[in-house]
Image (cartoon, rainbow, N blue to C red):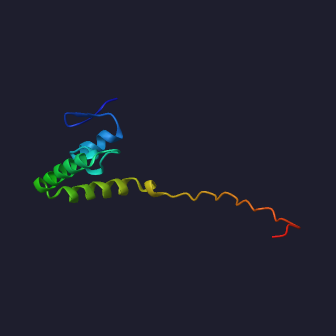
Amino acid sequence: MRTYIGPHQAVSPHDFVELALGTPVELWLGVEGETSAERAAREDAARDILADDPGLPDGLIRIAAQVIEENPDLFDVVPLPRPARRRRAARKGVAA
């Protein structure tokens, strides 16, 4: 089964996020190993997008709130058991 959002096919969760944002996720989060020049260019592009669409952050907050509301189990936290601590064997009869 194929999923389309408008004329765009979404084949992964990453595609859905990108289509919801209207921009690649990497524009906002960066990529591992980017140079300072690449980071500066990415931040300039992000500033231009925000200047053209000042309502974008509000829209993103609404999307995030909707996802959280529809998927409350995203924040179900299950405590993990702590591993048993190893005790050092007491040295008997050893002079310090």
Q: Is residue 68 left or right of residue 81?
A: left
* Whether residue 65 can be seen here: yes
Q: Position of residue 59 (x, y in %)?
A: 22, 56
- Tell me which residue sits at (55%, 57%) in the image: 78
Going by the picture, which residue comes out furthest to the left? Answer: 52
**Residue 23, above or below 76:** above
Going by the picture, which residue comes out furthest to the top? Answer: 1
Place residue 32 in its image quadrant.
top left
Q: Is residue 64 or residue 83 the one in the foreground?
A: 83
Count numbered badges in the picture. 0
Which quadrant of the figure contains the C terminus? bottom right
Going by the picture, which residue comes out furthest to the bottom? Answer: 96
Q: Position of residue 5 (x, y in %)?
A: 24, 38
Going by the picture, which residue comes out furthest to the front? Answer: 96
Q: Position of residue 12 (x, y in %)?
A: 35, 37
- Tell me which residue sits at (45%, 54%) in the image: 73
Q: Is residue 56 left or right of residue 79?
A: left
Q: Is residue 18 or residue 96 the one in the foreground?
A: 96
- Tell me which residue sits at (31%, 55%) in the image: 64
Which quadrant of the figure contains the N terminus? top left
* Whether residue 21 can be seen here: no
- Tell me which residue sits at (80%, 62%) in the image: 89
Place residue 6 in its image quadrant.
top left
